[in-house]
Amino acid sequence: MTVTEVLESAAVLLGDANKIFFVDDVLLPFVKAAHLEIQNDLIANGFRPFEVLSVVITIPANSKVIPVPPDNLFVIQKIEEAAVGSTDFVQMHERAWEPNTVPSTVLGSWVFRESKVQLIGATVDRDIKLYYIANNVGTISGAGSTINLTNALPVYAARVAYLAAQFKGRNKEAARALLGLYGQRLVSYITIEIKSQQGVTYRRRPYSTKRQAIT
């Protein structure tokens, strides 16, 4: 999906298919804002394709941080550790603060603080695996940018149109309708994606706004 497709679809929802008022330069800032908001909404609603298992990372002896964490790391779900080269991984314990214990041959626990994974530090090298939610939808630099989400055009178009109607067009009635449309499309998108990839029944979470069909 390209940003150009989002711009065109959002303009249609705004009743400006020829983009006379809502030209690309007007809509592009709203696409960038919607891009981050949609990712957070998907993650908050259990969108599993963002979940990633890292490659094995070796933590040098006495190291108290992960030397090179994944560059797309957003939220850590759990961490496992093992002896270097071993496949016998065991789950580490997440704590609020580093425990006041003497370092040993295992890491044992981890703390996420100051935007880093903090470790006690083991007396020997240890391998770890990170289970985390990734920020992997890409960065928008212009209309030619690509958004790495399959079949998400209806969701993006509704969110961008809502933001434009609310903060540029100053049309509260249209903004309410578009926000309701976004809520409907978001729920449908999450339901389809999770069912297709997980093969389980998805329990819908109610969206916080009144859902309306735009006419």
Image (spheres, rainbow, N blue to C red):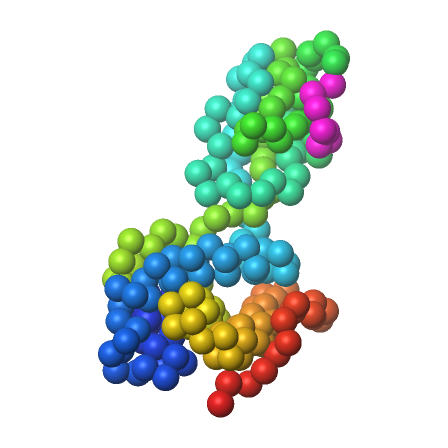
Q: Is residue 95 at least partly visible in the picture?
A: yes
- The residue sitting at 72% across, 29% down in the picture is 95
Residue 109 is drawn in which quadrant? top right
- The residue sitting at 39% across, 79% down in the picture is 14
Residue 132 at x, y percent in the picture: 58, 44
Instruction: State left or right for residue 110 relative to residue 134.
Output: right
Residue 17 at x, y percent in the picture: 30, 83
- The residue sitting at 26% across, 71% down in the picture is 23
Residue 50 at x, y percent in the picture: 54, 54
In the displayed structure, 77 sits above or below 65; it is: below
Residue 42 is drawn in which quadrant? bottom right
Residue nearest the observer in this picture, 171 or 203? 171
In the displayed structure, 141 sits above or below 203; it is: above
The quadrant in which the N terminus is found is bottom left
Instruction: State left or right for residue 184 relative to residue 200.
Output: left
**What main secondary structure does the magenta stretch of the protein show?**
loop
Which stretch is magenta?
93-99
Residue nearest the observer in this picture, 5 or 77? 5
Q: Is residue 152 at least partly visible in the picture?
A: no
